[in-house]
Amino acid sequence: MYYKDTGFRALYKNFVAFTLRDNLKQCIDNYPNADKANCILTYGYIDHDAGLTMEILAAGIKDGDSFTFFDTSTKARAFIRVGAIIEDEFFFFDDKDGELSKRYSEKLDVLNHYAVSEEIEETRKMAFLDKSRHEYYPDDVMVYLTKQGLRPEGCWVRIIGLGDHFIMGTLLNEPNQNFGYHKGEKIAFFVQQQEDKSVILYTDMTPSRKLTAEDLEDGTLLKEAVSIFNKERTEEHFIDILEFLRDSYVWIPCNAVFSDVDMAEFEKVLKESGDNLSSIVGKTFRNKENIRMIPDILQNGEQFFFPVFSSAEEMGEYGKHFSKVQKHILEVIPMARNNDKKVSGIVLNAFTEPFVLDAELFDMVENMKSRLE
C-alpha cells in the first residue's frame, strides 16, 4: 500500500511498518538492535500544526512476509513527517488483540499530548472534506473566500471547531484581495455540493446589511434574527445573528454583592430598626465601596452557560430575582471566557427562543468587522 493511494486514514492511529531506507537509518540510532534492522514499526498521529506524522516505535526485521520487531527506546524519541515517506510502500498491522498497544504503551502514551478537541477529531472522519484537505496536513483545508465585487479566492484554513451547520477555522495565508479578513483570523465556512456532486468549502464575506445603533437599541432585530434562524438554519441567517450580536448591547442577570464595610452598615440599620422594618421603608442607603455584580450562570447537565438577554423584559419571571446590567457583547465575551465555571458558551434569551454562541466562536465574533454606519 502507498500513502498516495490510500489517504491519511490508512496511517492515522494505526501500526504501520516501513522499509528502512538510508535516509531513515539515523532516526533509529538509539533504538535497540538498530544495526540489525531492515524495517521500522511506526504509529500514525496528527500534529495539529505539523501534520500527519509517524512515531517510530521500534526497529525490526522483515523476512519475506514475516516481521519481527524489537523493544522500543526508553531514552530516545523519533518521528517522521509523512512527506518523507509518501512514496514508500507500507505494511499495515491490525492490533485486534492489543499486543502491540501494550508492548509499546510507553511511546503511545506520549502521543496523548497531540490530542485535539472532539470537534476537530470528528472532522477528521468526514470523507467529504478529503478532496479539500492538504496532502500532508489533514486538518488544513482549501476554502474559497467570496465577497461581492471580488473574485472567489482559495485560501488554506486550519480547522479548529465544528458547529451544527458550519466549520470553524483559522486563515493560514493572507488573501490577495481585500476580504476584510487576514491571516491568523478565525472564520466560519460551509460545505456546498456542486451539480456534479463534488464538494467545495466556501465562506461569504459580503456584509449582509448596514446597521445603525438605533436598529439594535431595543434588541428586537437580534431577537427576530434568532427566530428566523431557528425556522431555517441557513448560512445567511446564521451570519445575520453573529453580525447583529457583534454590535449589540445585551442584558446580564447579576447578583449584587456588598463589600464587608457596606454589609456591616446595612446590618446596623436593620438592627436599629428592631422589629419595625417598616420604619426603614423609603430611607436611602448609600454604599461606601463598590458593589460587585456577579453574573448568574446557567447549568445544563454538565455544561455551564453565561446567560444574556436581548432586552431586560426578555428575562421574564427569572429576571425578578436579579439585578440587571447592560453591557456590549464585546465586554461580555471576556467575562464569559474568564468565568470560573469554564462556560461552554453564551446563551441568548435562554427561556424564550434561545441561541447559543459556542465558546469556540467567541474569537470569531470579537474579530468580526462592525456593520454600524
Image (cartoon, rainbow, N blue to C red):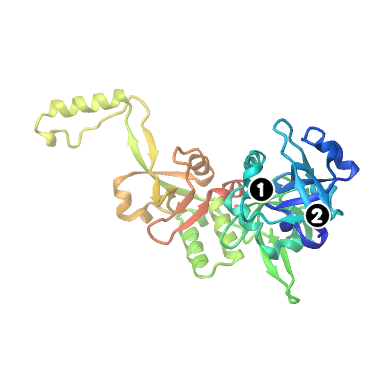
Mark 1 element type: helix
Query: Alpha carbon of mark 2 to alpha carbon of mark 1: how far?
Result: 17 Å
Q: Residue at x 29, y 26 (%)?
A: 262
As drawn, which residue projects farthest toward the right?
Answer: 22
Q: Is residue 291 visible?
A: yes
As drawn, which residue projects farthest toward the left?
Answer: 275
| Residue type beneath disc 1 | Leu
Give the quarter of the image for residue 264.
top left
Q: Which residue is mark 2?
A: 90
2 and 1 marks in contact (CB < 8 Å) = no
Q: Give residue 137's position: percent from left, percent from top.
A: 75, 51
Ranked by sequence position, the earlier of labels 2 and 1 is: 2
Q: Residues within 10 Å of mark 1 (few under 14, many from 20)?
A: some
Q: Give residue 110's position: percent from left, percent from top.
A: 65, 39
| Residue type beneath disc 2 | Phe
Nearest to the observer: residue 323 or residue 186: 186
Asked if residue 86 lies left or right of residue 315, the reply is right
| Figure quadrant of the N terminus | bottom right
Q: Which residue is mark 1?
A: 100
Q: Is residue 186 above or below residue 221?
A: above
Give the quarter of the image for residue 277.
top left
Q: Give residue 207's position: percent from left, percent from top.
A: 65, 59
Q: Residues within 10 Å of mark 2 (few under 14, many from 20)?
A: some
Q: Is residue 51 visible?
A: no
Asked if residue 245 lies left or right of residue 61, the reply is left
Nearest to the observer: residue 48 or residue 107: 107
Asked if residue 73 lies left or right of residue 252, the reply is right
Mark 2 element type: strand
Q: Give residue 326's position: percent from left, percent from top.
A: 43, 45
